[in-house]
Amino acid sequence: MTEKWQDDAEYVSYIQDLLETEEVKKLEKFTHHLHSTRLDHCLSVSYNSYKLVKKWGGNARATARAGLLHDLFYYDWRTTKFDEGSHAYMHPRIAVKNAEKITELSDLERDIILKHMWGATIAPPRYKESYIVTLVDKYCAIKEASEPYSQSLRLKWRHWFPKKQSV
């Protein structure tokens, strides 16, 4: 999970009202990318995107908020199917509708949420912040899904190739 987001007062000030909603708290109940909760994933995407956007002179507040809300849906994506389209197509639309129930979204925030699956969907993002969240989302998903395997490999590596003692 993302380290030290709670210690970043500016970041917390942007998302605190959202974290206090039952809708966002419910994300803790859903496993996401095998080894994390959906809330952990959303916080990772939100905070890492916020840090990059802040560094590159974008709208840090909108990025933090939309990053937190980008996967605001309440079903198991591995088993739930839609007649209207794939999970990659449907869940951003569901997330926007759910987000609009708890906060007013700017055009930028709406674009971030709707376009975060670009690559798996056709419509490209309109803003640099949307591209950043899209890429950070993929990075976090891969990291979350692979983390236990990489830890296991590191342990095996150390067993097979122990450090030699210096003389």
Image (cartoon, helix red, strand yellow):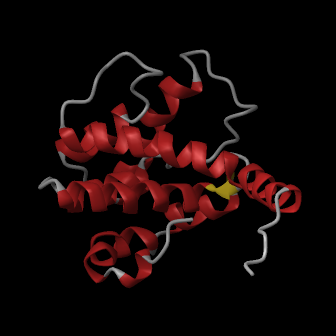
Question: Which residue is depicted at the point 39% across and 51% down?
Answer: 99
Residue nearer the viewer, 36 or 79: 36
> Is 46 drawn above or below residue 7 in the view shown?
above
Q: Can the viewer see residue 101?
A: no
Please provide percent x and percent y for residue 39. Answer: 56, 60
Tally of numbered discs:
0
Q: Can the viewer see residue 129?
A: yes
The quadrant of the picture occupied by the C terminus is: bottom right
Residue nearer the viewer, 101 or 28: 28
Viewed as shown, does residue 35 lie left or right of 106? Answer: right
Question: Which residue is depicted at the point 29% across and 62% down?
Answer: 51
Please provide percent x and percent y for residue 55. Answer: 19, 60
> Is 133 drawn above or below residue 29 in the view shown?
above
Viewed as shown, does residue 57 lie left or right of 163? Answer: left
* Residue 161 in which image quadrant: bottom right
> Is 84 drawn above or below residue 134 in the view shown?
above
The quadrant of the picture occupied by the N terminus is: bottom right
Please provide percent x and percent y for residue 34. Answer: 73, 47
Residue at far left of view: 57
Question: Which residue is depicted at the point 57% across and 44% down?
Answer: 141
Please provide percent x and percent y for residue 24. Answer: 50, 62
